[in-house]
């Protein structure tokens, strides 16, 4: 009977060690929440369209120019929603 209990307990300890050893089950520190900037823009505010047809290069350039003005005040962020954003360099 004692041997059966020891064997049964060892199976639980073995399973616990296996689960804790896998990366997906580890209980580490949670990923930190990214620091958001005090000012946020959306690329569509600058005339961009994420349809995969319209060239959005000028809209991205306007957005970067607007964001660069907030450098001394903690910066700004540019939110780009899901879509197909076509850009190209002018030659």
Image (spheres, helix red, strand yellow):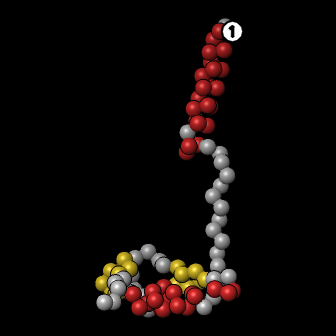
Looking at the picture, how far across and down is residue 25, in whole percent?
A: 58, 43
Residue 72 figure quarter? bottom right
Q: At x 58% / y 88%, what residue is drawn?
A: 68
Quarter-of-image position of residue 70? bottom right
The quadrant of the image that shows the C terminus is bottom left
Residue tagged 1: 2
Q: Label 1, secondary structure: give it.
A: helix
Q: Vertically, is 34 above or below 67? A: above
Q: Is residue 45 left or right of residue 16?
A: left
**Residue 39 horizontal/vertical position (percent):** 63, 85
The residue shown at (65%, 20%) is: 9
> Residue 55: where, in percent of width, then height?
34, 87
Judged left or right of residue 35, residue 24 is left
Residue found at x 34% / y 84%: 88
In this view, the residue in front, 19 or 70, is 70
Of the 4 image quadrants, the one containing the N terminus is top right
Identify the residue shown where x is 36% and y is 77%.
84
Neighbour class for label 1 at 10 Å: few (<14), some, many (≥20)?
few
Q: Nearer the viewer, residue 78 or 75?
A: 75
Quarter occupied by residue 34: bottom right
Instruction: From the viewer's perspective, tell me whether residue 69 is left or right of residue 55.
Output: right
């Amino acid at each position: 009977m004692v041997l059966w209990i020891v064997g049964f307990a060892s199976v639980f300890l073995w399973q616990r060690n296996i689960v804790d050893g896998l990366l997906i089950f580890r209980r580490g520190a949670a990923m930190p929440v990214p620091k958001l900037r005090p000012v946020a823009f959306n690329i569509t505010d600058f005339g961009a369209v994420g349809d995969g047809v319209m060239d959005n290069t000028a809209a991205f350039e306007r957005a970067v120019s607007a964001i660069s003005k907030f450098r001394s005040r903690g910066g700004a962020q540019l939110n780009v929603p899901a879509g197909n954003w076509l850009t190209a360099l002018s030659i």
